[in-house]
Image: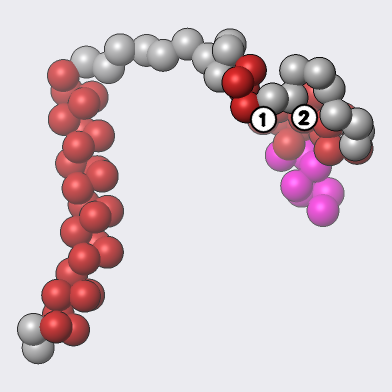
Amino acid sequence: MAFHLLLGAKVGSTPLPLSMYRWGVRTDDKPRSWLRGVQTKHASAIGRMLEVVVIGGIVVAFLLPAVEYVLP
């Protein structure tokens, strides 16, 4: 538990551990407002290709055992 709290403090600074102990619901805790402050970065072509390769590898890793099961 201590490791979890220390990691939360490192990643989210002070607000993250404090939010774990506050059970109240704030007015801005709605799904519509969750992505309000998020800014998207446009990826370069190389970054996009790398993303496709990684996601494709994950998909293949999930599908290969099923194919080997169906076609022994």
Identified at 53% across, 14% down, the residue is: 38
Q: Secondary structure at mark 1?
A: helix
Residue furthest bottom as drawn: 72
Horizontal side of residue 48 vs 26, given as left or right = left
Specify the segment rendered in magenta. Answer: 1-7
15 vs 42: above or below: below
What percent of the width, then of the height, locates residue 35? 56, 19
Name the one closer to the observer, 70 or 30. Answer: 30
Residue found at x 24% / y 55%: 59
Viewer-nearest of labels 2 and 1? 2
* In-front residue for pair 2/39: 39
Across and down, in percent, residue 52 comes to 20, 37
Q: CA distance from mark 2 to mark 1?
A: 8 Å
Q: Magenta span has 5? A: yes
Amino acid type of the residue that numbered disc 2 sits on in the rendered structure: Leu
Looking at numbered disc 1 in the image, what kind of residue is underneath it?
A: Val
Specify few, some or many for label 1: CA neighbours under 10 Å numbering under 14, 14-19, or 20 or more: few
Query: Which mark is drawn over residue 16?
Result: 2
Residue 43, quarter of the rendered image: top left
Q: Is residue 11 left or right of residue 1?
A: left
| Residue 63 part of the magenta-drawn span | no
Give the quadrant of the C terminus. bottom left
Locate residue 21, reporting x and y percent. Answer: 91, 37
Decide whether the magenta segment is chiefly helix, strand or loop. helix
Q: Quadrant of residue 64?
A: bottom left
- Residue 14 seen in the current view: no
